[in-house]
């Protein structure tokens, strides 16, 4: 009996040894590709990030920026930012797409036939990184995108370094431009749904991003010389035909996501009283593009609601409030996923001129930005708009207030941007939310998500300590 057991044991060991030896071969699909083509990844990164952040911008960003308010499921609107509901957790969107973009960047440097992708990948990395750090402050960066070959518990980099250090935002924009200018092969850039493979479009995009982010850190760093050089060169977005955007459609799966959700979710978001006040004070006709007249007014009036209501103790009648316009549901073919535009670039330049960071005519830049913003939103610019309350030097306002407010208006759907600019400038003036869960304070950063505390605890604790316990009231570096 013992002999028989020994024989069976030896056979079992041999079988298991053979299985272990061939495990990888047996469990590998011979038909699966070993790597994804950069053209497919580039298309995926651009579309996924643009689509998801457009949705986030509507259901969460627009609440923080007070373009809209939420009737229910609105803890986020009451500034309990650690309790995301329909949206409000952009962290994984950034990191998933930054990780995939890093694969493109690696492929472009390791495979000669993929070299054309290096410049665009560097520019996209700078773009997404800036969006991430502007929301959260210090974040995992220098060790964050090499989980396969490196650490899965990356350190948090200081925002100051993320912006200014080697391989940071500004450096990557410069390196992206240089990589494109140095590219002398004929292999085209494929998968590019922003510029159709036009490498010059990527250079113009990078220069426009440099204007935006140099201005953003201008309270901390002297950026005037570099801004002046970019302005003098003139290679930045100057018309809406150059915008870094892609179009949604009217049909699944490429329609704007709010058009695909049930009507109850769509009807949860209505005109904010802050947005209503700003648009009406300016006699701004875009209110009819962004929102619908109230049902009870027979199409003649627009009604907003204060942000952050306590839905359990508030009686509301939807027919008295303005829902989002048809562009966000019935006709999303006229809506874009917006990375960066000419109108935003002109507003950035106008502010730089008004602050003395560049030598230029701030009024002309402002008026061009307004004109392009109305054109972008397919709304006729009233003949007297720029001579009335929206004029550059209107009574009771300042040029800086006018510039930033116009940028804020046009950035509806990119609501996080409106909130970021309010944090940086204080414009437009936000109203207090009705039932604040943050002691009446408007947040000035997004909180690190709970999964960071669970999965990257040691590094998270250091970052949390630097933000008063992961407080949403702790300003980021450029806002201190």
Image (tube, rainbow, N blue to C red):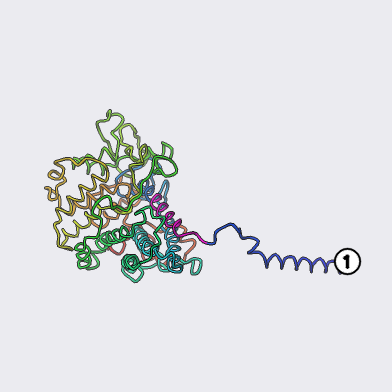
- Left or right: where does residue 229 sit relative to residue 22? left
Image spot of residue 101 (x, y percent): 42, 61
Magenta segment range? 35-52
In this view of the protein, which residue sits in the foreground, 306 or 25?
25
Does the magenta segment cover residue 399?
no
Does the magenta segment cover residue 39?
yes
Q: Secondary structure at mark 1?
A: loop
Image spot of residue 246 (x, y percent): 35, 49
Residue at the spot x=43%, y=65% of the render?
108
Which residue is disc 1 drawn over? 1
In this view of the protein, which residue sits in the foreground, 409 or 306?
409
Which image quarter: residue 119? bottom left
Which image quarter: residue 387? top left
Pick the quarter of the image with the C terminus.
bottom left
Residue at the spot x=42%, y=40% of the render?
251
Say above or below: 478 vs 332.
Answer: below
Looking at the magenta stretch, what is its main secondary structure? helix
Image spot of residue 92 (x, y percent): 44, 56
Instruction: Mark yes or no: residue 144 visible.
Output: no
Instruction: Mark yes or no: residue 118 visible.
Output: yes
Image spot of residue 443 (x, y percent): 32, 54
- Left or right: where does residue 174 sit relative to residue 22? left
Pick the quarter of the image with the N terminus.
bottom right
Residue at the spot x=19%, y=42% of the render?
381
């Amino acid at each position: 009996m013992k002999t028989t057991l020994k024989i069976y044991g030896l056979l079992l060991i041999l079988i298991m040894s053979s299985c272990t030896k061939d495990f990888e071969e047996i469990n590998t699909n011979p038909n699966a590709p070993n790597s994804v083509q950069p053209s497919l990844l580039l298309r995926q990164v651009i579309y996924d990030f643009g689509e998801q952040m457009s949705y986030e911008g509507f259901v969460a960003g627009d609440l923080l920026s007070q373009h809209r308010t939420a009737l229910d499921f609105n803890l986020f609107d009451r500034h309990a930012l650690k309790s995301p509901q329909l949206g409000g957790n952009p962290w994984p969107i950034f990191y998933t797409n930054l990780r995939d973009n890093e694969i493109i960047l690696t492929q472009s440097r390791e495979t000669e036939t993929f070299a054309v992708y290096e410049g665009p990948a560097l520019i996209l990395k700078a773009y997404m990184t800036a969006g991430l750090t502007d929301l959260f402050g210090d974040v995992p960066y220098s060790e964050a995108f090499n989980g396969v070959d490196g650490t899965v518990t990356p350190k948090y980099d200081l925002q100051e370094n993320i912006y200014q250090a080697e391989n940071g935002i500004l450096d990557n924009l410069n390196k992206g431009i240089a990589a494109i200018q140095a590219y002398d092969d004929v292999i085209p850039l494929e998968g590019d749904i922003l510029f159709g493979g036009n490498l010059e479009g990527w250079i113009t995009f990078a220069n426009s991003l440099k204007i935006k982010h140099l201005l953003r850190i201008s309270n901390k760093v002297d950026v005037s010389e570099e801004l002046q050089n970019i302005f003098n060169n003139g290679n930045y977005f100057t018309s809406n035909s150059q915008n870094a955007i892609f179009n949604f459609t009217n049909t699944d799966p490429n329609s704007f996501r709010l058009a695909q959700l049930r009507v109850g979710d769509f009807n949860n978001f209505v005109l904010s009283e802050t947005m209503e006040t700003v648009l009406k004070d300016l006699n701004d006709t875009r209110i009819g593009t962004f929102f619908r007249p109230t049902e009870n007014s027979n199409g003649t009036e627009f009604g907003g609601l204060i942000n952050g209501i306590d839905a359990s103790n508030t009686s509301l009648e939807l027919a008295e409030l303005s829902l989002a316009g048809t562009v966000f549901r019935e006709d999303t073919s006229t809506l874009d996923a917006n990375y960066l535009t000419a109108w935003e670039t002109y507003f950035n330049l106008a502010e730089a001129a008004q602050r003395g960071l560049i030598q230029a005519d701030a009024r002309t830049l402002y008026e061009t930005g307004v004109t392009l913003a109305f054109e972008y939103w397919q709304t006729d610019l009233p003949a007297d708009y720029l001579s009335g309350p929206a004029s550059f030097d209107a009574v009771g306002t300042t040029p800086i207030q006018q510039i930033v407010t116009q940028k804020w208006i046009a950035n509806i759907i990119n609501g996080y941007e409106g909130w970021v600019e309010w944090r940086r400038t204080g414009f437009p003036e936000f109203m207090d939310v009705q039932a604040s869960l943050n002691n009446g304070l408007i947040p000035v950063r997004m909180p690190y998500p709970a999964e960071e505390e669970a999965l990257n605890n040691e590094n998270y604790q250091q970052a949390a300590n630097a933000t008063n316990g992961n407080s949403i009231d702790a300003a980021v570096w450029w806002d201190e």
